[in-house]
């Protein structure tokens, strides 16, 4: 995997320090072409496990083929059945937003973080998720994190595609600028 076009070695080290579950994607030649890292805090939220997607990086040749989503399903195989209640992460990618919406009630799109349940989730994130704790410019209502990535927009993903417009429109109305490195914190309250 070429780090020049992906994450820095320091970024990978930092994510590894905050991850409990790590998966590697290999191609048929046994070449690593991607990774996913997850955090599973011991503390539960409303008596349910909370899975945080800490990091994902895929080489361009394997992007937009569902491998990131597949890593989530692989992780589910190792968790106690019906105990996972929340899945969260930080992203710029509208395709990822669409996936989170498909699996549950999505904060901040279906409900902002300024509601009673949204505030409870944000308090949990601040208490147990280092990636949230370390975010300096976080809007606690919209979940938008300003200027997180110094590189600006990360990844090679399409914009303005079917069924992602609601995310892009809502975020832009709140001042979201992925080209300036902005991200958004997503939490899906899962449908069990």
Image (tube, rainbow, N blue to C red):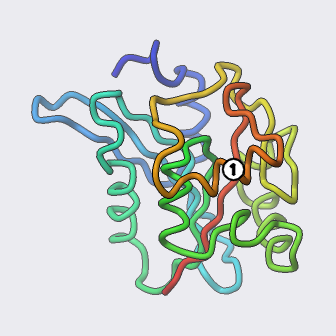
In this view of the protein, which residue sits in the foreground, 95 or 170? 170
- Residue 105 x/y as whole percent: 62, 75
In the picture, which quadrant includes the N terminus?
A: top left
Could you tell whether 56 is left or right of 166 in the image?
Answer: left
Residue 120 drawn at (x, y percent): 82, 74
Q: Residue at x 59, y 72 (%)?
A: 86
Task: In the rendered view, tell whether residue 57 sits above or below residue 80.
Answer: above
Corner quadrant of residue 141: bottom right
The residue that appears at 32% across and 48% down in the rendered structure is: 67
Q: Residue at x 45, y 29 (%)?
A: 156
Assess disc 1: are there few (<14), some (14-19) or many (≥20) residues with their C-alpha within 10 Å of its C-alpha: few
* Residue 160 at x, y percent in the picture: 53, 43
Q: Which residue corresponds to the image point at 32% horizontal and 42% vertical from the top-left? A: 24
- Name the residue beneath numbered marker 1: 169
Residue at the left extreme? 28
For residue 112, which quarter of the picture?
Answer: bottom right
Which of 53 and 42 lies nearest the eye of the viewer? 53
Question: For the residue labelled by badge 1, is the local secondary structure a helix, a strand or a loop?
Answer: helix
- Residue 25 lies, in percent from the top left, at 28, 41
Tell me how many marks there are: 1
Q: Residue furthest top?
A: 4
- Position of 1 compared to 152: left or right? left
Whether residue 54 is situated above or below residue 12 in the rendered picture: below
């Amino acid at each position: 995997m070429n780090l020049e076009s992906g994450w820095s070695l320091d970024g990978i080290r930092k994510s590894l320090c905050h991850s409990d579950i790590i998966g590697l994607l290999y191609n048929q030649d046994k070449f690593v072409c991607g990774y996913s890292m997850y955090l599973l805090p011991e503390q539960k939220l409303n008596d349910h496990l909370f899975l945080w997607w800490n990091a994902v990086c895929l080489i361009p040749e394997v992007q937009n083929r569902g491998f990131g989503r597949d890593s989530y399903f692989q992780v589910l195989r190792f968790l106690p059945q019906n105990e996972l209640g929340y899945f969260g992460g930080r992203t710029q990618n509208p395709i990822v937003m669409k996936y989170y919406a498909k699996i549950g009630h999505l904060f901040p799109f279906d409900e902002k973080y300024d509601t009673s349940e949204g505030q409870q989730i944000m308090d949990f994130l601040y208490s147990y998720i280092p990636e949230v704790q370390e975010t300096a410019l976080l809007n606690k209502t919209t979940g938008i994190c300003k200027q997180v990535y110094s590189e600006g927009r990360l990844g090679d993903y399409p914009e303005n595609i079917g069924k992602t417009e609601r995310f892009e429109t809502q975020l832009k109305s709140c001042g979201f600028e992925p080209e300036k490195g902005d991200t958004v914190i997503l939490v899906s309250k899962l449908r069990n």
